[in-house]
């Protein structure tokens, strides 16, 4: 389910120089003699995979292959909320705010190169930041948005780029810059339709750029011979193999066919670790953004806040977590961010957040009837007189979500809603309708790479993230097609101040808006399922050292893992 260790000195948004120090790795280790005695590559497996298509377009989040982002293409920085929050250097050597916070000066790594051997230039960086002018599909900094805060992006010397803002933007590095993948201008400036470009033979600056095998069931990305960080990577290749379901992937990791997966494994201690206690491990990090039940809020009666609050109180989160998620995913309150941003929570709102997330069928029914819903023979009817009914869709191979949704459907039936679970055969059948919320579903939240909750609320409140009903929201995370004018105004205030104290006061107001409207229904932490073998490779994020999100499909954060992996 898509489900090196240097920390930046100073806070994002402060008037300070970000002195980014590249972590030096140990000497490279030799590869295994053969696949029969050792894996020559780190082998990763997924779940619900369709036949692989050779698509390495870093802008195409719906169909690109894993390790495109972070393996082939790099960002200037990697931002993560894990491990207490970090900003790591990549293609940026240093950053500094100036002009009273309205300019960001970025010095790029002077020795960075593309995989074809050509120098990565300041012009490539400027192009990548401003590529939205060529094609809005490439716009990752909001350059073309009506409310864009970007005044200019210009080269200022051989290795320096200066981004000027219309207003102070203290959140830009963590929530925006870290998502901009740098691509070679010479290649991408000639692409006429970026959305449809599969980029089958990519040229990137990342550690694994050579496609040395590709077919419908597996592909191999091998080491970039021109990688600019000396001595890295310390492994020769990364391989992605297909798995039809969680159970199929479990067989692969138990049998030693795969080293790494981010699938749910029920009773992982017995099902996986017990087969090789020395080498088989799991880091099921219960820290992260929540998994929400999402409706399309442009549709009636989902558009009624009281309906969503009633649904929230009708769900037995503790049962869902215990039986559906096997106890590995902590239940959350109605805000959903208490595990990943505990220092940002308004203590005065905790009782309300807890109440709205507490299983209480009686309160749920009262929420419905108080908003004009009625009951006939135990069945719930909306104020227009129609029976409340819907199917919740999920990929059949995602066993944890299937079990969780079956519990949720039964909970909703108990308060009169005609709810049922519809199993989809694979990602291709589920994803287009799920991410446009053409049907009700569980989905992940955006913003987990930010060191503040700004990006989380931005994805739900800002009008620019609301792409409209029936539109795939994979690029923004606004699955519910919702926006909030008051929230958007507060977010502008948030990024316009460099004071963390003021930011926290604004964050409290953002949380109140969430609880008043409940645009998504947080249920449990999106656990960062990571099962991995150290038989051949070590260096993965662990409970003791969660230096980034351990899931290998989490955008640019995976580069930190790929550069930390080494031979056992």
Image (cartoon, rainbow, N blue to C red):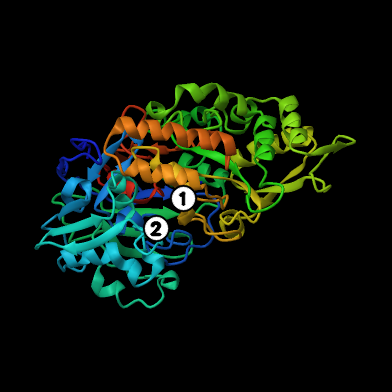
Left or right for 20, reference 48: left
Seen as rendered, the residue at the extreme right is: 377
Residue located 67% across and 30% down the image: 313
Cα–Cα gap, marks 2 and 1 = 10 Å
Residue 283 visible in rendering: no
Instruction: From the top left corner, tell me how far across and down residue 103 is, in percent.
Output: 20, 52
The answer to which image quadrant residue 351 occupies is top right
In the image, residue 270 above or below residue 202:
above
The structure residue drawn at horizontal position 34% and vertical position 53%, both measured from the top left corner, is: 179
Judging from the image, what secondary structure is the residue with disc 1 in? loop
Q: Which residue is mark 1?
A: 462
Q: Quadrant of residue 156?
A: bottom left
**Looking at the image, do the residues carrying marks 2 and 1 touch, with CB atoms under 8 Å apart?**
yes
Mark 2 against mark 1, which lies toward the viewer? 2
Mark 2: which secondary structure? loop
Given residues 498 and 113, the one toward you in this image is: 498
Image position of 412 with respect to 220: above or below: above
For the point 17% across and 59% down, the residue is 161
- Which residue carries the number 2 mark? 147
Can residue 109 be seen here? The reply is yes
Is 523 in front, or is 511? 511
Residue 284 lies, with reference to residue 169, above or below; the image says above
């Amino acid at each position: 389910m898509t489900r090196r260790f240097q920390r930046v000195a100073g806070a994002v948004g402060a008037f300070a120089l970000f002195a980014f120090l590249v972590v030096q790795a140990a000497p490279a280790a030799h590869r295994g003699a053969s696949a029969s005695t050792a894996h020559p590559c780190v082998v990763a497996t997924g779940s619900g995979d369709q036949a692989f298509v050779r698509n390495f377009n870093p802008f195409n989040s719906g169909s690109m292959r894993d390790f495109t982002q972070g393996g082939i293409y790099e960002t200037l920085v990697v931002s993560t909320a894990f491990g207490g929050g970090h900003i790591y250097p990549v293609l940026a050597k240093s950053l500094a705010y100036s002009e009273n916070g309205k300019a960001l000066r970025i010095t790029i790594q002077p020795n960075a190169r593309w995989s074809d051997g050509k120098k990565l230039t300041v012009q490539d960086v400027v192009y990548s930041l401003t590529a939205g002018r060529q094609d809005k599909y490439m716009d990752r900094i909001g350059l073309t948005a009506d409310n864009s805060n970007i005044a200019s992006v210009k080269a200022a010397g051989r290795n320096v780029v200066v981004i000027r803002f219309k207003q102070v933007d203290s959140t830009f590095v963590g929530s925006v810059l870290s998502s901009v993948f740098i691509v070679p201008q010479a290649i991408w400036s000639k692409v006429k339709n970026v959305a449809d470009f599969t980029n089958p033979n990519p040229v990137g600056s990342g550690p694994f750029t050579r496609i040395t095998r590709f077919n419908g069931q597996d592909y191999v990305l091998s080491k970039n011979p021109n990688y600019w960080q000396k001595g890295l990577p310390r492994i020769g290749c990364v391989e992605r193999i297909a798995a039809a379901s969680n159970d199929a992937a479990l067989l692969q990791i138990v049998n030693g066919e795969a080293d790494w997966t981010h699938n749910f494994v029920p009773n992982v201690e017995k099902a996986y670790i017990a087969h090789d206690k020395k080498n088989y491990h799991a880091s099921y990090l219960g820290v992260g953004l929540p998994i929400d039940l999402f409706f399309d809020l442009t549709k009636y009666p989902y558009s009624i806040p009281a309906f969503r609050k009633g649904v929230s109180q009708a769900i037995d989160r503790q049962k869902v977590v215990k039986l559906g998620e096997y106890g590995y995913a902590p239940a959350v309150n109605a805000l959903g961010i208490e595990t990943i941003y505990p220092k940002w929570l308004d203590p005065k709102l905790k009782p309300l957040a807890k109440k709205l997330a507490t299983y209480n069928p009686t309160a749920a029914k009262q929420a419905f009837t108080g908003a004009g819903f009625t009951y006939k023979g135990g069945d719930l009817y909306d104020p227009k007189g129609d029976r409340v009914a819907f199917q919740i869709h999920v990929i059949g191979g995602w066993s944890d979500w299937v079990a969780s949704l079956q519990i949720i459907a039964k909970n909703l039936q108990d308060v009169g809603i005609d709810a049922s679970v519809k199993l989809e055969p694979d990602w291709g059948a589920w994803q287009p309708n799920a991410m446009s919320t053409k049907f009700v579903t569980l989905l992940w939240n955006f913003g987990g790479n930010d060191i503040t909750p700004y990006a989380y609320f931005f994805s739900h409140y800002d009008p620019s993230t609301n792409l409209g009903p029936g539109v795939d929201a994979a690029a923004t995370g606004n699955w519910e097609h919702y926006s909030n004018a008051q929230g958007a105004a507060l977010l502008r205030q948030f990024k316009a101040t460099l004071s963390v104290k003021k930011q926290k006061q604004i964050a409290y107001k953002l949380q109140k808006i969430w609880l008043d409207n409940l645009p998504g229904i947080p249920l449990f932490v999106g656990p960062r399922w990571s099962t991995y073998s150290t038989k051949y490779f070590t260096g993965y994020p662990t409970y003791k050292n969660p230096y980034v999100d351990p899931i290998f499909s989490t955008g640019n954060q995976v580069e930190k893992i790929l550069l930390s992996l080494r031979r056992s």
